[in-house]
Amino acid sequence: MIESSAKSVVLGVTGGIAAYKAAQLVRDLQRHGIDVQVVMTEAARGMVTPATFQALSGKPVHSDMWDASVPDNMAHIELSRGKDAIVVAPATADFIAKLANGLADDLLSALCLARECPLIVAPAMNRQMWENPATRRNVDRLIRDGVAVLGPASGDQACGEVGMGRMLEAGEIAEAVAGFLAPKLLAGARVLITAGPTFEPIDTVRGITNLSSGKMGYAVARAALDAGARVTLISGPVSLPAPAGAEVARVGTASEMFEAVKKHSARCDIYIGVAAVADYRVDKPSRHKIKKTERDQLNLRLVPNPDILAWVAQRPRPPFCVGFAAESRDLDAYADEKRRRKKVPLMVANLAQEAIGSDDNEVTLLDDRGTHKLPRAPKDVVARQLIAHIAKLYGAKRRKAE
Ligand code: C5P
């Protein structure tokens, strides 16, 4: 059984231009499996209509402190009870000032003051307002009070100026909230992950590689970080930003990846090989660019690369090992054969033609107890479910060893 623990938040929308991004944020939070109840300030209602948020969240939007539709007429207390967090995005300078001083003169500020759950704010304002000593004091006060502050970012502003104060993008906020709410299933565990393709040179400018984007491996790294693990990510050549909080080693060839894994594997509890490692490399890559000749054939001699996953799994006291098998047919049979041959307790099988480069993935988990098919979902959602499954198996292994 794959566990899913549904989360729910109040999304507070205040009256900044960035309120339009909050509509996308509802969608992005839902994509992470987070249920959203929207509460708007009066000023926010002047920016985006409540009907937009009602349609997106599937729930009536609240703004009124004495909303008769809330059963006991105590909207300022009731709406956040049982919620996992209140997320205020955008949070204007004015609203941040209210929070810092404990004011409660409208529904959203009263909800924040009466809350039992964590508060997360995503500031959005003009750069002068952000830099003003009053705002600096208020933000410092919020941080000291234990409020999580996401952003802001630097960039073009609605007022035409450029600088700090722009709200983070909806996707970034949703990811941070999902990470904040994720159960800390791997607290303290050291996790080593490989991701992306490898690049095997033919000469100084050419090489053999594959279409792996690194998206799945990076999503697994973020999910492990969110679960409280210490993560080392060994990445082949990809154009993805390093997951915040991970130690990242960038490599090119399978041999370099192998060396990096050797260096880190003795100090890890869990090894997850997501990388699409080239099975072969060119025996002696040319030290100069190969010239075209009149010959109609150019033969490259390929020699096998070491199997990194199998090497880690055969160490004297191996970490809990997880492999990824990308197959184009007979998925479960090939993946299970690989699992047994490489002697790993868990293999994640996916169809190569559907998984590689895509934002979504559909995987089957194969372990000693059988197969578990996960529904098709964005890679970060799949990664969270995978980490929950790994945490369960890893926890059972540790209990057995004790
Ligand atoms: O390429 P293959 O299907 O055998 O990959 C299955 C698993 O083995 C993946 O987790 C991959 O990272 C790992 N692997 C490896 N070293 C190789 C080939 C594959 O670690 N040379």
Image: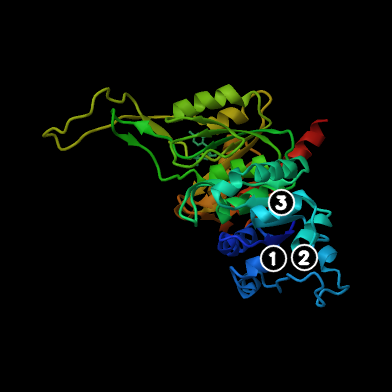
| Precedes in sequence: disc 3 or disc 1 | 1
**Helix, strand, or loop for circle 2?**
helix
Indicate if the residue with disc 2 has its beta carbon within 8 Å of ligand 1. no
Q: Position of residue 112 (x, y in %)?
A: 78, 56
Is there CB contact under 8 Å for labels 3 and 2?
Answer: no
* Within-10-Å neighbours for mark 3: few <14, some 14–19, many 20+: many
Is there CB contact under 8 Å for labels 2 and 1?
Answer: yes
> 365 or 88, which is in the foreground?
88
Query: Disc 3 vs disc 1: which is toward the camera?
Result: 3
Q: Residue at x 61, y 48 (%)?
A: 383
Indicate if the residue with disc 1 has its beta carbon within 8 Å of ligand 1. no
List the residue tagged with mark 1.
Answer: 41
Q: Position of residue 12 (x, y in %)?
A: 69, 61
- Vertical order, 22 against 369 (above or below): below
Instruction: Indicate the amino acid at tag 2.
Output: Leu
| Precedes in sequence: disc 2 or disc 1 | 1
List the residue tagged with mark 2.
Answer: 107
Which of the image's four quarters has the C terminus?
Answer: top right
Q: Is residue 225 left or right of residue 358?
A: right
Query: Disc 3 vs disc 2: which is toward the camera?
Result: 3
Any mark on residue 97, and which?
A: 3
> 28 or 361, which is in the foreground?
28
